[in-house]
Image (cartoon, helix red, strand yellow):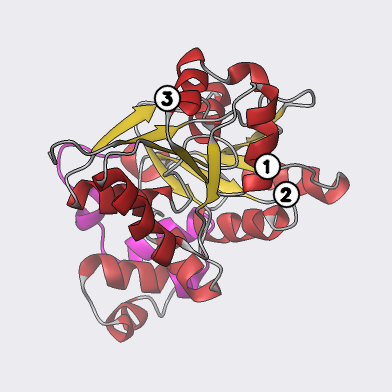
Amino acid sequence: MLENSGVLYLCATPIGNLEDMTYRAVRVLGEVEVIAAEDTRHTRKLLSHFDIHTRLISYHEHNKITRGPELIERLVAGENVAIVSDAGLPGISDPGSDLVVLAVQAGIRVVPLPGANAALSALVSSGLDTALFSFIGFLPKNKKKRRELLYSFVNSPYTMVFYESPHRIKQTLTELKSAFGDRSAVAARELTKKFEEFIRGTIESLITHFAEKEPRGEFTLIVGGDTINQSHETGEDEEKQLSIEDAVIALIKNGVAKKEAIKTIAQQRGLPKRNVYQATLGIE
């Protein structure tokens, strides 16, 4: 650890309800030399509410390459810096994670100030399995990368957690249905706010719901893992016991298109796609 350096505080801020701000966060934000904020205008309103007058500087996706090293210089010089995102815990689906990497590499102490987090708040309230889960966050914008990422989770038994905006959630649900079939799913919106809502059901029922009711607010989606294949395990690898044809059929029964099922099995077994295709010619 670098001697006489400052401390980088990762400060959680409310995701909706201002009462979720912690006493510790209010104190630290008032004591540090500078606060690095994703949107200074948004954070200034928060600081005004709690009568905090610390200097604000911007740190976001578009200036992190230059601003990150500047913040590290401040920390090395002995200044304490707090970083905040617009809502929730910095470092989750925002550039705060990049600053943490730089700080760790420079030997600077990193201290988390825990607080509100949309992913965990939605997960623990979903009613789905919380023992093992995968946080995926926002899906890639590129369609091919999005599809590849989703199909890499087809056989995962872990509950999945996604972030999504209201104008994209319908398309995302359709892509989830194509990849996973119709599984248990929960859409959580407006968490901690006045109109907080949990829409519980399946991927298909959520598609129907949002076809009838226009989605509003930011969403956290919770989707169940693959329980069909996992429930049939007998101590050996069930998937490897299946023939190529049966493995593809199992995916198709789970709602995966035949073409994507062939691609998935080929990837999982390290086989050329043409070999899997030839083995499944009899499947309608």
In this view, 247 is above or below 233: below
Pointer 3 or 1: first along the chain: 1
Does the CB distance between marks 3 and 2 fall below 8 Å?
A: no
Marks 1 and 3: in contact by CB < 8 Å? no
Estimate how packed mark 2 is, as few (under 14), some (14 to 19) or many (20 or more) residues with alpha carbons within 10 Å: some
Residue at the image position 52 percent from the left and 17 percent from the top? 22
Name the amino acid type tagged 3.
Pro
Question: Which residue is disc 3 drawn over?
Answer: 114
Q: Secondary structure at mark 3?
A: loop
Give the total number of marks visible in the rendering.
3
**Residue in view at x 22 percent, y 39 percent:** 5
Q: Which residue is mark 1?
A: 42
Give the image location of residue 59, x and y in percent: 50, 53
Residue at image point 44% right, 24% down: 28
The disc labelled 1 sits on which kind of residue? His
Residue 239 lies, with reference to residue 272, above or below; the image says above
Helix, strand or loop for disc 2: helix
Q: Nearer the viewer, mark 1 or mark 2?
A: 1
How far apart are the two marked residues, 3 and 2, measured between alpha carbons? 34 Å
Q: Looking at the image, can residue 199 be seen?
A: no
Name the foreground residue: 162 vs 244: 162
Mark 1 to mark 2 CA distance (whole Å)? 33 Å
Residue 16, image quadrant: top right
Q: Is 45 left or right of 182, judged from the image as shown?
A: right
**Which residue is tagged 2?**
207
Mark nearer the N terminus (3 vs 2): 3
Secondary structure state at the residue bearing disc 1: helix
What segment carries the magenta color? 231-260
